Image (cartoon, rainbow, N blue to C red):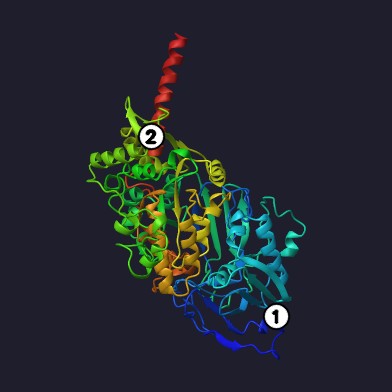
């Protein structure tokens, strides 16, 4: 438990003690108290005796050309070597405990926070991590780093070194309970390392870090290997016990998901989280799964699934009218898609905070209604009268009633049908827009949507681009409609400004991809951030959710309440489930399982291939085919030679 201390003039200098009551502790919770008391041994969801060793081989799609992921350039790979002042637990809504920082100090109004660093914290080159590194990291990231850092830490007024291992962050506002926690998430980088390097440039030299892993080897665009640091300074900290158990993590890059699935089934990689329902249902009917060598498991989680959706860029004139945005939602037939493409695995998303208590439901009441009443004259009446429901169909693939509803909304918005084309009543120009994709897997989902848009007379085109072009276009808001997922935590806060606020709408590289500029949304975001209790946070988030849904900025997709994991049977994990689902950082390489798997595979000669569910010719059959072809070739050549001799 944090200790409440009344700091007197005799104890600390006036700038600190004059603040009054200060809380000093080993951790900090968004609301309430941390679950784990000072001196705790380890988190409950880990195995403190997990053995260290072994390799886990995983895959990623695309490529990489840098190890510097803190600037808006390049396509960076994660090194696993960067640490933060605090680290979060996986079994609390939002609580952080000391990592580089040993203790935390803050007043009741959370208008500032002081971090006391661990004297034993070290960079990989052996030099200590100091308050100077912390100050430099903040100043550099907010000045030269990704734009999200400037936005995320806009509430920081000043950073001060109070000593070699003591640093203070002062905030521009009081009562923002999240600010001390998000400052605790600041990546801490080594000032002495970057003193001789250009921070603004991409690099394939793995930067110096302090974390449990570092890059051991790589080939640009093909693979990289994270190696566990044997003398890692923080390996015995309670927040790290039972975690980071693999000696090596090898990440291989593939062009697409199909190649990754083949690599998994052939044993070239060990683990994959499947993100495609069709593949989960059909692609793993293989001998390795049937024999129990390749595990196929749904691992339940309790995390908010957020919002995956077709995102309409309201910066484009075609999407500026809310009735147009609402109408387009009727062209997406989720029921047909779920049955025919997803094998009925998904649930329709109807909240930006789905799968959590934060999601709005029914009609507003109590405190939520009181909050919304303040903005009644700025909100559509439906916020108070009609719960949000995504358009539904009979799943036949011909959503006639929904398209009729869409036509009515489009007519109200000034669009009519002429010569089978939906045109603007005033200009006669047909409605047209581009759907931007980076993954070919989404084409089969988008094309039926495009077909229904065509039935409305809309000229919608699908554009598939490479990863680099896709990232650059998103950074510059250069798109009409695309697919995106806003992840959410159990304790939403300052990141909501980056997602939905008017300021973020004009900020390059923010996540306000829809271009939302709504003063009511802005006000609700601030209420969420300032929520004094968990109960008020839930109520205010539901109000924000309700207003966002009423704006029809997106066409919601779907979600699943489990991780679809596939992994070869050579790993173990604790029995205690976590809200986070898979969480491979708490897994370990099980030498007994691995040996048993190898013996079983050697003994079983019936497994001809692990790549598909169909038997394919083995080497012997292939050799016979080749021999037959050579024999035929020999007789053909012999006959031709004889004919020439005659």
Indicate the quadrant where residue 340 lies.
top left
Q: Nearer the viewer, mark 2 or mark 1?
A: 1
Number of the label disc, if any, that sits on residue 625:
2
Q: Which mark is residue 238?
A: none
**Relative to 91, is 173 on the left or the right?**
right
Q: Crowdedness of circle 2 by 10 Å Cα count: few (<14), some, many (20+)?
A: few
Answer above or below: position of 379 versus 431.
below
Query: Which residue is most to the right?
Result: 196
Q: Is residue 313 left or right of residue 380?
A: right
Q: CA distance from mark 2 to mark 1?
A: 86 Å
Q: Residue at x 56, y 87 (%)?
A: 4
First in residue order: circle 2 vs circle 1: 1
Q: Pointer 1: residues within 10 angstroms few (<14), some, or many (20+)?
A: few
**Secondary structure at numbered mark 1:** helix
Above or below, 402 against 560 in this view is above
Position in image of residue 435 (x %, y %): 44, 39
Left or right: 537, with 87 as reference point: left
User: Can residue 574 be seen at all in this image of the molecule?
Assistant: no
Q: Position of residue 407 (x, y in %)?
A: 30, 37
Among all residues in the image, which is located at the extreme bottom?
10
Q: Position of residue 252 (x, y in %)?
A: 53, 51
Q: Which residue is mark 1?
A: 15
Name the one closer to the observer, 433 or 543. 543
Residue 140 visible, this angle: yes
Q: Report the residue at 43% width, 19% height from top.
A: 638
Above-or-below relation of 22 to 397: below
Image quarter hosting the C terminus: top left
Specify the farthest residue to the front.
Answer: 377
Between 444 and 420, which is closer to the camera in this rendering?
Answer: 420
Taking depth in this image into account, of 232 and 325 the one nearest to the observer is: 325
């Amino acid at each position: 438990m944090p200790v409440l201390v009344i700091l007197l003039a005799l104890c600390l200098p006036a700038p600190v003690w004059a603040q009054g009551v200060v809380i000093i502790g080993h951790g900090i919770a968004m609301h309430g108290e941390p679950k784990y008391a000072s001196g705790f041994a380890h988190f409950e969801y880990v195995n403190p005796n997990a053995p260290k060793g072994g390799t886990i081989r995983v895959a990623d799609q695309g490529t990489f050309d840098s190890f510097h992921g803190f600037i808006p350039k390049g396509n960076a790979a994660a090194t696993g070597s960067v640490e933060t002042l605090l680290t979060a637990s996986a079994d609390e809504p939002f609580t952080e405990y000391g990592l580089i920082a040993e203790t935390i100090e803050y007043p009741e109004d959370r208008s500032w926070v002081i971090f006391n660093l661990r004297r034993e914290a070290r960079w990989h080159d052996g030099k200590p991590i100091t308050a100077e590194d912390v100050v430099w990291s903040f100043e550099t990231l907010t000045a030269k780093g990704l734009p999200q850092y400037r936005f995320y830490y806009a509430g920081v007024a000043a950073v001060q070194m109070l000593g070699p291992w003591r640093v203070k962050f002062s905030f521009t506002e009081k009562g923002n309970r999240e600010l001390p926690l998000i400052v605790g998430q600041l990546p801490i980088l080594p000032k002495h390392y970057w003193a001789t390097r250009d921070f603004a440039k991409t690099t394939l030299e793995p930067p110096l870090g302090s974390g449990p892993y570092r890059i051991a080897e790589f080939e640009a665009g093909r693979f990289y290997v994270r190696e566990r640091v044997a003398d890692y300074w923080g390996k015995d900290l309670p927040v790290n016990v039972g975690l980071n158990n693999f000696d090596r993590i090898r990440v291989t890059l593939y062009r697409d998901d199909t190649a990754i699935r083949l690599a998994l089934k052939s044993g070239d990689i060990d683990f994959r989280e499947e993100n495609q329902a069709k593949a989960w249902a059909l692609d793993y009917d293989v001998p390795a799964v049937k024999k129990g060598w390749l595990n196929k498991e749904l691992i339940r989680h309790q995390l908010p699934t957020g919002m995956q959706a077709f995102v309409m860029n309201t910066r484009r004139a075609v999407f500026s009218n809310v009735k147009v945005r609402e109408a387009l939602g009727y062209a997406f037939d989720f029921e047909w898609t779920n049955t025919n493409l997803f094998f009925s695995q998904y649930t329709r998303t109807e909240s930006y905070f789905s799968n959590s208590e934060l999601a709005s439901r029914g009609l507003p009441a109590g405190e939520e209604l009181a909050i919304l009443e303040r903005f009644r004259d700025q909100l559509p009446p439906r916020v108070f009268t009609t719960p949000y429901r995504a358009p539904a169909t009979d799943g036949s693939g011909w959503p006639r009633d929904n398209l009729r509803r869409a036509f009515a909304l489009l007519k109200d918005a000034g669009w009519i049908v002429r010569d089978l084309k939906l045109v603007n009543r005033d200009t006669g120009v047909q409605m047209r827009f581009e759907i931007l994709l980076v993954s070919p897997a989404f084409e089969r989902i988008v094309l039926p949507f495009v077909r229904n848009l065509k039935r409305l007379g809309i000229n919608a085109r699908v554009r598939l681009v490479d990863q680099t072009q896709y990232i650059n276009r998103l950074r510059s808001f250069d798109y009409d409609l695309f697919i995106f997922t806003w992840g959410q935590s159990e304790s939403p806060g300052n990141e909501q400004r980056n997602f939905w606020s008017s300021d973020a709408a004009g900020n390059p590289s923010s996540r306000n991809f829809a271009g939302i500029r709504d003063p009511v949304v802005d006000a609700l975001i601030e209420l969420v951030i300032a929520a004094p209790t968990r109960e008020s946070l839930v109520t205010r988030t539901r109000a924000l959710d309700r207003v966002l849904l009423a704006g029809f900025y997106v066409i919601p997709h779907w979600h699943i309440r489990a991780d679809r994991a596939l992994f070869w049977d050579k790993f173990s994990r604790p029995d205690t489930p976590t809200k986070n689902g898979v969480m491979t950082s708490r897994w370990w390489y099980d030498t007994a399982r691995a040996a048993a798997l190898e013996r079983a595979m050697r003994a079983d000669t019936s497994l001809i291939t692990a790549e598909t569910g169909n038997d394919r010719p083995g080497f012997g059959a292939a050799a016979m085919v080749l021999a037959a072809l050579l024999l035929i070739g020999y007789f053909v050549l012999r006959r031709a030679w004889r004919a020439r001799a005659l």
